[in-house]
Amino acid sequence: MPIVEIDAELVELPKSVNADTAKSTTVLVDDHEGLLEPVAFMLNELGHECISYVDPKIALDVICNPNLEIDFMITDYSMPEIFSLDIRQLSAKHRPNVPIILATGYSERTAQDETLSKRPHYVLNKPFGFSEQKEILNTALTEH
């Protein structure tokens, strides 16, 4: 194999990652399996327990389970099988006090979504890193 040189930067985790983020349990829903692992990793590094689902239908079953303690949810805004609106509506019925964070690469679409004004939510624009995720989690946990 030939040796290939690439320009790459090492990324260090912030030293104060766990400083002001309260521990919580997160339900993470995204139809792209490749995105679940890095987001779950960031959540774990921030001190949160993360339950990840690539299948939104299974996530809906979990949301309806009253025996599972959930502090907040992060869901992809646009999924092919189930629109995040369905997840928001069901969670509003079964878990009205659980904040929802919408992860999206389409912030202009969420800005025009009238259904979002009916329930408090937070938008996390993709791509995001530790600092953005930590900030939105702290905001969601503080306001609820």
Image: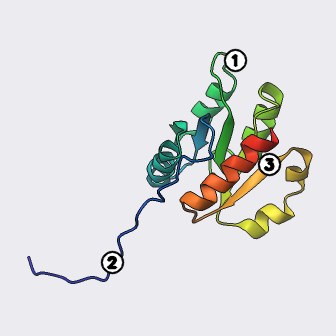
Asked if residue 134 is positioned above or below residue 1 in the image, the reply reads: above
Q: Mark 3 sits on what residue?
A: 121
Residue at the limit of the structure toward the left, as seen here: 1
Q: Amino acid at mark 2?
A: Ala
Residue 122 in view of the camera? yes
Q: Which mark is residue 125?
A: none
Q: Earlier in the sequence, mark 3 or mark 1?
A: 1
Q: Position of residue 86 (x, y in %)?
A: 75, 40
Q: Position of residue 74 (x, y in %)?
A: 64, 45
Q: Mark 2 sits on what residue?
A: 8
Q: How far is disc 1 from disc 2 in space, using C-alphas?
A: 46 Å
Q: Kindly state the secondary structure of the residue where label 1 is placed.
A: loop
Between 15 and 53, the residue placed more toward the observer is 15
Whether pointer 3 and pointer 1 mark residues with C-beta atoms closer than 8 Å, the reply is: no
Q: How far is disc 2 from disc 3 in space, using C-alphas?
A: 36 Å
Q: Earlier in the sequence, mark 2 or mark 3?
A: 2
Residue visible at 50% across and 50% down in the picture: 42
Quarter of the image for the C terminus: give it: top right
Q: Amino acid at mark 3?
A: His
Hey, which quadrant is residue 130 in on the image?
A: bottom right
Callout 1 crowding tier (Cα within 10 Å): few <14, some 14–19, many ≥20: few
Q: Which mark is residue 66?
A: 1
Q: Kindly state the secondary structure of the residue where label 3 is placed.
A: strand
Q: How far is disc 3 from disc 1 in space, using C-alphas?
A: 21 Å
